[in-house]
Image (tube, helix red, strand yellow):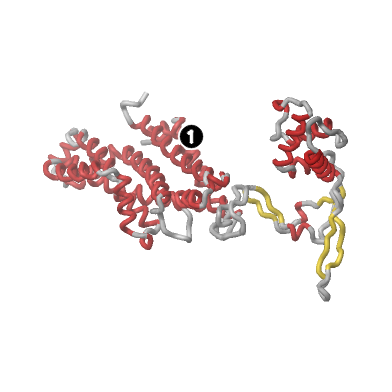
Amino acid sequence: MKNQIKQLLKSGKFMVGFIVFMSILLFITIYPFFVPGNPLQMIGYNSFIPPGTYLSLYDAVNPNVFVYTLRIPGAAEARIVNTLPMSDREAMRDWLVRAGMPEAAIDIYDPETLLALWNANYDPDERIEGMILADHRAYQRLNNRIQGMFDASALRLYSADPETGEPQFQAPITDTDYIALSDIVNIRRLPLGTDNFGRDMLKQLVQAIGVSLRIGLIAGSIATAIGLLLGLVAGYVGGWVDEIIMFICNLLTVIPGFVLLVLLAFSIGPAGRSVTIVGIVIGLTTWVWTTRAVRSQVLSLRNRDHVNLSKLSGHSLPRIVFKDILPYIASYVVMAFILQVSGAILAEAGLSMLGLGPSTTEVATLGLMMNWAMSFSAHIMGAWWAYFPVVFVIALISFSLNLMNTGMDQIFNPQLRD
């Protein structure tokens, strides 16, 4: 056993999968300590708030916050680049093309270069031949808007008088006024933005990983236990017992496993589909291939010399099965368990996408997060942060578990061993 463990530690595939999986577990364990609170709490009143750092505007304009005066080169240009709408960019391109510039040389998705071309070529007094007066006036107004962005006038901050309620002037705000983020009390970082309900996506994702892994462990334990027990009995006892077990396996093999899973989940109903029940249902429908695999291993072991010696010694069937056969297939059982956990996580995601996953508003799962994103058209609205991280995490977990299984298979399978 010690030699096999040393071989596992030297297996590149197993170690990569193990490190990735343990990193995920470590992250979901530590993150809640730094960002506590209910992951399903609605903190935003807008749907699909993009990822970013958000500070309180109320705190930012507080007169007690110290204001620094900074003259940063290029600040006005950067402000224009950030606020220049696409319609104005298209209008600037149209004028430049009509002025004789090749359209291929104009990139409206590069506002900084587009702005430089505009300032270098546009003359408000020049009227291009063939251009009607209305268009000429429209381009002049566009130029005035652009130049007005450069000449930013001061904003005036008012507050209501506590006695009369009348607006009372507080202070001007100019384009050279800056405040330090460290002086702002309320700052919220949303690395993955929010979902359609205004809930922190990263906090949800951390919780969902834990819940989905719990479903995987429940389903994997049940499926492996049933498959191991039936496979041991069928392979060692043989005869009519083996025929009955194999008949049941063949019967369940004819029916697609996911279809059976969908039917069972639908028959339970929303009221009964808790996280635990979904894990149990998945486990009860995915044990067949484990039974077949364990049975084939036991058939190759039951006539070994040490097993025959135990039979001649009068040892009981349970002792022979669990002490003389099971230790020889223990590594194979572990690999089967890993695959069962991976398959259960994918099965839960598939069920939840169909609306047949855990029916709960208290916790999130990876499948439920995908369901919420698709139900509220995140893919249509361009809210990639509502579904892409979930897909990536599902793929990463499945990849790490399957990589661990491949590494173990290369160590414990004589046919693949170097």
| Residue at image point 78% right, 31% down | 130
Q: Is residue 252 visible?
A: yes
Quarter of the figure with residue 382: top right
Q: In this picture, is 266 found above or below 118?
A: below
Q: Position of residue 338 (x, y in %)?
A: 38, 42
Q: Is residue 208 visible?
A: no
Numbered marks: total = 1
User: In the rendered image, which quarter contains the C terminus?
Assistant: top left
Q: Nearer the viewer, residue 318 or 110?
A: 110
Horizontal side of residue 98 vs 213, given as left or right:
right
Q: Position of residue 147 (x, y in %)?
A: 84, 42
Q: Nearer the viewer, residue 293 or 129?
A: 129
User: In the rendered image, which quarter contains the N terminus?
Assistant: top left
Question: Amino acid under label 1?
Answer: Val
Q: Nearer the viewer, residue 165 or 292?
A: 165
Label 1 SS: helix
Q: Position of residue 368 (x, y in %)?
A: 46, 52
Horizontal side of residue 245 vs 405, given as left or right:
left
Question: Mark 1 highlights which residue?
Answer: 16
| Residue at image point 83% right, 30% down | 121
* Residue farthest toward the top in the current orientation of the protein: 418
Q: Position of residue 146 (x, y in %)?
A: 81, 42
Q: Nearer the viewer, residue 328 or 141?
A: 141
How crowded is the residue under tag 1: few (<14 C-alpha within 10 Å), some, or many (20+)? some
Q: In this picture, is 2 found above or below 241?
A: above
| Residue at image point 38% right, 57% down | 276
